Image (spheres, helix red, strand yellow):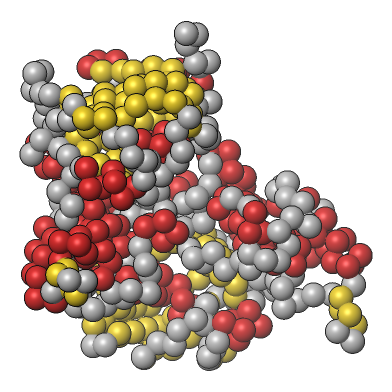
Amino acid sequence: MNIDAHVGTAGGDFIATGVSKHYGGVPALTNVSIRLEPGKVHALIGENGAGKSTLGKIIAGVIAPDSGILTFRGELLVLRTPRDAIAAGIVTIAQELTVVPSLTVAENIFLGSETATASVVHRAAMRQRYDELAALAGFDLHPDTVVGALSTAEKQKVEVMRALSRKASIIIMDEPSASLSTSEVGVLHSIIRHLAASGVAIVLISHFLNEVLDLADTVTTLRDGSLIATAPAQECTERGLIEGMLGRSHTAAYPEKVLAPTDAPVVLDVQHLSAPGVQDCSLQVRAGEIVGIAGLVGSGRSEFVRAIFRDAPLSAGRVVLDGTELKKRSPSVSIREGVAFIPESRKEMGLLMGRSIRENTALSRLPWLSRWSWISRKRELAAVTEQVAKVGVKAASLTQSARMLSGGNQQKILFARTLMCTPKVLICDEPTRGVDVGSKRAIYDLLVAKAQEGMGIVVVSSELEEILGLAHRVVVMRHGQITASLDGDNVNEQAILVAAFADAPSA
């Protein structure tokens, strides 16, 4: 099938000149210029809050710049709405998925561009269009599946196919691979290369610098809303890009490991735990120890830690904290007893996105901050101010909505809220997902500091490098069972991968 049938006329550059944008007097972009060329992948990189997504939204017509000029194919371009951008051939695959959960896969893909006559949708024609797109993308999604039943990765595929259906000349991809498995990322990268080879200009916004260097023709670095550099990707290195993003010399990605004392007490003892997706798993964590949980997608990592936190029903096993069994099974009891949890999705499972920083942070300590069911605003403000300062949240004020913050600052709010409970054990599921390199290091420093204070830390991560960089000991899972427990020199990439692909040991 010819991909040219699914893309618009790609000739001519898109140029943004002197673009600036402010929010409440705070600059998000300052005098930024960029050129997008047909058939090229142009990456935008920078820390969270650097202005990448703001620039992408301006190009996509989602927001209007305060100043600056946009031209496309030599003509002035005025984008008042995303529909204006789509009409011009500019389509976005947003970081925030825009699928409609109640509609089917095909209905989502062709939403607003249905094949119809006099308001009557031609299902057969839509099915033919869908089959062509599915063959092009290489995605195995049934067109009649309701999108609400799909995983995050599958919803991402729907977004990609929707962009292909709109014959775009420019496609903006904001963190397109953040929720995909390794094999799915490979498919996505093939699609990006194919689209670029067909003349489409791709704007790639990504935290994954290896992805940027692998795919991009040109890389633009933003910092604090200003353009730092634009250079051919072949002239860039990961080290140089990080230094440009941070504005300082590159340092080690991870803090120095400080092992817990050999006689440190066991603070968490999980004995023969079974739950949905988990079979007979045991785990011990000592005070001051960071234990990593590794494994492939679907290995049972998240199910295991959620069961420990009592966010899933147990069919067998015991959870003992500081020598006392946690018999009551609910997250609120776990928190009260000293087990805290950072979920893998801060937007779906963690934060109240429409609420303020103050409200989100104080949520875990409302009983302590209240008297006779009335919250002491003075006590709340003092506690929240202290905690967000400790974790390094950057915001205009504590009344700012969580939705308006960068991913890194949103994640730090989760940590602020969780640590306000002063837990004995902190469980983190994907603690740096969707977080820029600067915020990652801040979170790593925070975890190491809490471990040195005597807290037991459990980290679940899909990034093997993160597990190796942080963990003192690594537990590897497959098919809901623990296949290996590694420490010392055995904590290495090869040993983890062997265990991740191995069958669980027999009892």
- Residue 126, given in percent of the width and then of the height, sits at 84, 66
Left or right: 185 as drawn, with respect to 116? left
Compared to residue 160, the image places residue 442 above or below, namely above
Left or right: 30 as drawn, with respect to 481? left
Front residue of 102/197: it is 102
- Residue 427, given in percent of the width and then of the height, sits at 29, 41
Q: Quadrant of residue 23?
A: bottom left
Front residue of 278/204: it is 278
Q: Quadrant of residue 453?
A: top left
- Residue 43, given in percent of the width and then of the height, sits at 44, 60
Left or right: 260 as drawn, with respect to 208? left
Left or right: 505 as drawn, with respect to 226? right
Residue at the image position 63 percent from the left and 79 percent from the top:
86
Q: Is residue 442 visible?
A: no
Q: In the image as oriented, which residue stretches furthest toward the front? A: 372
Residue at the image position 13 percent from the left and 42 percent from the top:
450
Front residue of 205/126: it is 126
Residue at the image position 23 percent from the left and 82 percent from the top:
26
Front residue of 164/310: it is 310
Residue at the image position 40 percent from the left and 87 percent from the top:
65
Q: Is residue 86 visible?
A: yes
- Residue 163, given in percent of the width and then of the height, sits at 65, 66
Compared to residue 100, the image places residue 283 above or below, namely above
Say how many tags the image has.
0
Compared to residue 506, the image places residue 107 above or below, namely below
